[in-house]
Image (tube, helix red, strand yellow):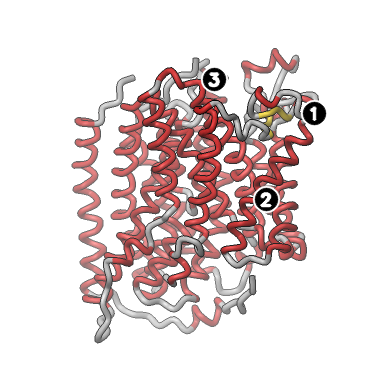
Amino acid sequence: MQTKEEPNLVEELSRMEWEPLVAAEKKLIGYSIALGVVLLAVLYWVSTAFFIVQP
Amino acid sequence: MSAAGTHWLKSEDWWSVWIGLFIFVLSLGVFGGADILGWGAQMNTWLDPGGAVKLASTAYQGLPVLLSILFTYLFLLAILSVGACFLGADLKQFGIGFTVVFALSLLCWFLGHYAYIAATPDKLGAFGIGWSLNLTGEAGFILALLAGLVVGNFFPGLADRLKAACRPEWYIKTAIVIMGAGLGAKAAQSTGLAGAIIFRGFCAIVEAYLIYWALVYFIARKYFKFSREWAAPLASGVSICGVSAAIATGAAIRARPVVPIMVSSLVVIFAVIELILLPFLAQWALYDEPLVAGAWMGLAVKTDGAAVASGAIVDSLIRAKALAIDGINYKEGWMLMTATTTKMFIDVFIGIWAFVLALIWCTRIDCKEGETVRLREIWNRFPKFVIGYVLTFAVLLTVCLSFPEKAAAGQLSTGEGNTFRVLLFAMTFFSIGMISNFKKLWEEGIGKLAAVYLISLFGFIIWIGLFISWLFFHGVKPPLAG
C-alpha cells in the first residue's frame, strides 16, 4: 500500500471562505430538528404500545 | 464511490462478509456431527498460566494447547491473506504485520484474563483470592488498545511496518458477521426482547440522525464559520458514524477528498477517547439500566470498531457490577447486541442520508448544470457486512426456533465461531490504538476543527444520545443467566 502525501490542514483551513447560511440550509436544519422532535413522540408511543417488553 | 470500492471481490466490506460466512458455515458442521472448528484456542480466567488456554470443543481433547494456538493463528492468517490478496495488499508485508498484531493482541487477551484483573466476585472463592479488579476477561481488549496506542505513538517505525495488517474496520466487520450467529441463538431464547431491541434501536437512530446532524451543522456554520464543504462532512463525522459518514457526505456534496480525510483523522482520535471513557462512565451510572448503556455506546461512540468494542466492554463491566452489588447475573451479550444493532442501523442509514444531502445540495444549495443524483448511490453506500450479519443472525435464529432439541449444538457452534470473533475483536482494539496518532491534536491549526468536534461531542451528542437511549431502553432488562 502506498502512502499518499499528507494534505496540510493549516493551509486548507486558512483557504476556507465564509459563506452565509442560505435559506435552503436554514430549512434543512429547521425541518430536520422539527421532524426529529415530532418523531420522538410518535416512535416513543409506537415502541411502548406495540413493542412491550415483559419483565 | 469507485467501482472497486463496491465490487464484491475488491472491497474490505464484502471480504468481511465472505470470511465471516466461511467461519460461520464451518461452525455449522456440529449440527451434522462434524466438529470442524473445535481445535480453536479459547481463554479462561487464570491464576496459573498453564490453565489459561482451553480448546473450543471437547471433541479435540488431547490436542496440546500450543498446537491449538498455532492452528488458530494459521487458520486466521490463511483466510485473511486470501482477502488481503484480493484487496491488493503486499502478502509478505501483510503476513509479517498480521503475525505481530495477532501475537500482541493474543498476549493482551491472555493477560486480561489474569484472575486478579478479571475474576468476578462469584469466582473469587474458586481461585482462592480475596480481591480482583472485577473487569472480566474483556480487560484484555483495553490492554490491547493501550498496547496499540504505545506502538502507534512511540514506535512509529514499527507501526509503519505493521500498517498492512492494521485494518480495524475489516476485523470488526468480520467479527460482527460471526457475532450475528451468536446473537441469533440468544434472540431465540427471548424473541420478544430481541424484536423490541431491534425496533427501539431503529427509533433511536432516526432520532439521532435528525437531531444530531442538524445541530452540529448549525453550530459549525453559524458559530465557527465553517464553509458548507467543511461543515457537512464534519457534522456527519461527529454526529453519525465517523469515518464512513464523513466520506459519504463529502462525496454527496462534492467536497474535495481532502476534507473528509481530515475530518476522519479527528474522528478516529476522539473515538479512542470515547472508547476509554464511556464504558466506565456507563458502568458507574447505568449498571441498573444495562440496555440503556448498550444503546448509548452504539449512539455515542463513533466508528464501527470503537462502538462495538465499547458495547463489548460495557457488557462485561455492567454484568460484573450488577453481580457484585445487586447479585443480579445478567446473560452475556445483550448489551453488546443492543450496541451493535444501534450501530448497524446508523450504518444502514448513511447511504440514505448521503442521498438526501446529495439531492438537497444538487437541487437547492449548490446547483450545477447537468449534475444528477442516482438512487444507486444508496446501494453503493450500503454497508455490505450488514448482509452477512443479518444472514448469520437469521439462520441461527431459525434453526434454534425450529429445532429446540438442537440447542446444545447451537451453543457449541456459536462458541466455536466465538473463538475467532474475540480474537478479531482484540486485533481491532490493537489496530485502533495503533492508528490513533495523538500528535495530530497538537498540530498547528487543528484547534478550530477539534473545538467544534469537542464541543459537539462532549457538549450535547453524548448527552442527547444518553437521553434517547434512556427514552427507548429504560426498564428493558437482559434475561438472567441460569
**Disc 2 versus disc 1: distance between alpha carbons?**
25 Å
Residue placed under numbered mark 3 in the picture: B323
- Residue B410 left/right relative to B68: left
Hey, which quadrant is residue B277 in on the image? top right
Q: Which mark is residue B49?
A: 1
Between disc 2 and disc 1, whose residue precedes? Answer: 1
Judged by depth in the image, the label closer to the viewer, 1 or 3, is 1
Q: Nearer the viewer, residue B73 or B157?
A: B73
Residue at 31 percent of width and 61 percent of height: B353
Q: Nearer the viewer, residue B230 or B358?
A: B358
Hey, which quadrant is residue A3 in on the image? bottom right
Whole-percent x and y of residue B467? 35, 41
* Callouts 2 and 1 close, C-beta under 8 Å: no
As drawn, B280 above or below B101: above
Q: Nearer the viewer, residue B3 or B433?
A: B3
**Disc 2 versus disc 3: distance between alpha carbons?**
38 Å
